[in-house]
Amino acid sequence: MRLGIIGAGGWGTALATLLAEKGYIIDFWAREQEVANEINTYHTNNTFLEGIFLPEHVIATCDIGETIKKNKFLIVPVPAQHMRSVIRKASPYLTKDHIIIHAAKGIEEGTLMRMSEVISEELPNEFTGNIGVISGPSHAEEVAKRVPTAIVVASARISVGEIAQKILMCPTLRVYTSTDIIGVELGGALKNVIALSTGISDGLGFGDNTRAAIMTRGIAEMLRLGVVLGADPITFAGLSGMGDVIVTCMSMLSRNRKAGIAIAKGKKVSDIIGSTNMVVEGIATTKAAVALSKALCVEMPIASTLYAVLFEGLEPREAVEDLMLRVPVPETMLGFKRLVE
């Protein structure tokens, strides 16, 4: 009854709290020594999840090797742009018996890889079937407060998903399984792009109509890219897709939505990135998603317009006008069967 969590951010802390209450001893790797000290001394992690008390058998360390050697089941809730460096640090201690379930929601800049691809590239081929992802509408703040939540775990190997489901399931966390790791990872990543866009809309003072339009057409973009990459279209109607879009675009617990609101009110992207310990995943993912869509000739007008706002100085109000007046490209020109309106 022991497991390792590599990454002591908000989501890792919420999971550590729930799983410790199930009876697991949690070996909790933190990058920052002060975070590990706070967890071990005061049983809190106010840097990343304020006001939550962790059970005493959540044991923090800054020694990643110690965490890995003690546990065959590992949850890795680190930001997408840090995933490669963390896995590279972990790799000397990993064996073919380890199961790695990541919880990042992003696409790596530069390589344009999903997180399971990043992990696979850093490890021997024998690990590929032992990699999974958890995703879905799950604010860490609510999960830690025992708000009923549903998520999905996806892995190419069914048995890995079932093991993760058994470990994670508890009275306030329902876990579904999937073998569509591509769709689940893309849904979790691209919902942050949509949330940034709806945040900008909200910051400009627009209403429910505008937000609903961005959410709906954003899911259409998510689906277009996903299908070209081999995802099951049905996945995007589920928890990591529609579910994640709803919660991230509607809630003020969403860092991406709040960042969009701040951008609409004139705050610079560089200031947003530097002003919080919590990573706004959608900023880097927008850059990666737009590059990926161009490489694959997939039309993603909302993501592309958001990119122009974030990185090219396009004024948010002008961006909305550009989107409203653009000429739609028929889905049949994108090289696959029409799947969305």
Image: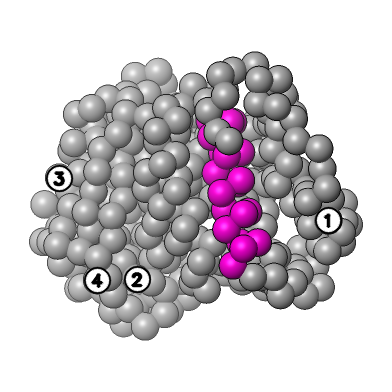
The stretch drawn in magenta includes residue 339: no
Q: Are marks 4 and 3 in contact (CB under 8 Å)?
A: no
Mark earlier in primary sequence (1, 4) = 4
Vertical order, 287 against 296 (above or below): below
Q: Crowding near pointer 1: few (<14 within 10 Å), some, many (20+)?
A: few
Report how far apart the C-alphas of labels 2 and 3 lie in the structure. Answer: 21 Å
Pinpoint residue 43: horizontal percent, then vertical percent: 29, 77
Q: Are marks 4 and 2 in contact (CB under 8 Å)?
A: no
- At label 2, which amino acid type do we have? Glu
Q: Secondary structure at mark 3?
A: helix
- At label 3, which amino acid type do we have? Lys
- At label 4, which amino acid type do we have? Arg
Report how far apart the C-alphas of labels 4 and 2 lie in the structure. Answer: 6 Å
**What span is colored magenta in the figure?**
208-226
Left or right for 142, reference 218: left
> Which disc is residue 166 wearing?
3
Q: Comparing marks 1 and 4, which lies closer to the viewer?
A: 1
Q: Secondary structure at mark 4?
A: loop
Q: Residue at x 41, y 45 (%)?
A: 240
Q: Are marks 1 and 4 in contact (CB under 8 Å)?
A: no
Residue that carries the numbered disc 2 in the rendered image:
142
Left or right for 55, reference 307: left
Report how far apart the C-alphas of labels 1 and 3 lie in the structure. Answer: 48 Å
> Which disc is residue 263 wearing?
none
Mark earlier in primary sequence (1, 2) = 2
Q: Secondary structure at mark 1?
A: helix
In the depicted view, which residue is nearer to us: 260 or 334?
334
